[in-house]
Image (spheres, rainbow, N blue to C red):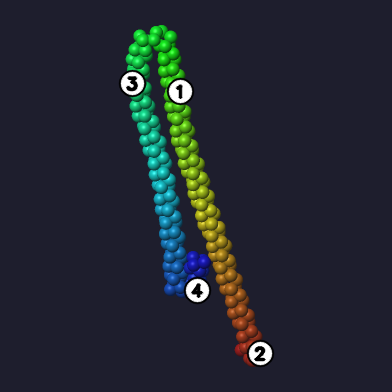
Amino acid sequence: MGKLAGKAKAAAGSLTGNDALAREGRLQEAAVDAEKDAAREAGDAQRAEEAAELQEQRSQAELERRRLTAELQTTDAEKQAEAARLEQEKRAEQQAASEQVGAAAQQRATDEAAREAKAAAEEERIAREQDAARLEEEARKTEVLADAEAEQQARRERAVADAERAEAEAEARAEAKAVEDERTAREQEAARLEDEARRAEARADAIDPEANA
């Protein structure tokens, strides 16, 4: 409404030759435009900050995923080294047992070691799969949140654009109406003055018909 009032003042000042009124209207209109620009810049800054925060969250999630992956790889290597050490010890024990109790005992020990190694490997595999699934789920959730935020941001920007367009259209209609009202008022004023002139002439004729002959 401030901008509309400024336009109306500027138009009225131009039509009536009132430079002060016209200047006041232009200044008021410029002030409203400046306020709108400031509000738009503030909104842009807020959106940029939100985007930066979202990017930071994504980066943190990626760093956490890499850290956990590195830990899993380190744990794998340690487990493999421990398994190799245990395997060597078991082989030594099995060798001693085989020398003492014979081939049958040695076979039983070997089978038992294989079963234990297989069970340990299966447990490790399950643990790795569970960790990988957890990381994948976290990444998916982060991506969903990012997509939702981007969609909300797009909706907010569309709403702002629609509101600004509607406001501009309303101001244009109001300005056109103000100009039309001014034109009508001037026409009515001209008709009134013309009517008064005709009446004055008629009165003069009635008073002194010869003077206006």
Residue receiving disc 3: 85
x, y percent for residue 178: 56, 68
Residue sitting at x 49%, y 47%:
149
Nearer-the-camera pick, 63 or 100 = 100
Residue sitting at x 61%, y 82%:
196
Element at label 1: helix
CA distance separating discs 1 and 2: 129 Å
Element at label 3: helix
Element at label 2: helix
Query: Where residue 206 is drawn, which disc sits there?
Result: 2
| Figure quadrant of the C terminus | bottom right
CA distance separating discs 2 and 4: 36 Å
Residue receiving disc 4: 16
Placement of 183 over or under 110, stated as above or below: below
- Label 4: few (<14), some (14–19) or many (≥20) C-alpha neighbours in 10 Å: few
x, y percent for residue 199: 64, 84
Q: Which of the two labelled residues, at mark 1 and mark 3, occupies the earlier sequence position?
A: 3
User: Please, which residue is most extreme toward the top here?
Assistant: 103
Residue sitting at x 61%, y 85%:
200
Nearer-the-camera pick, 55 or 173 = 55
Q: Nearer the viewer, mark 4 or mark 3?
A: 3
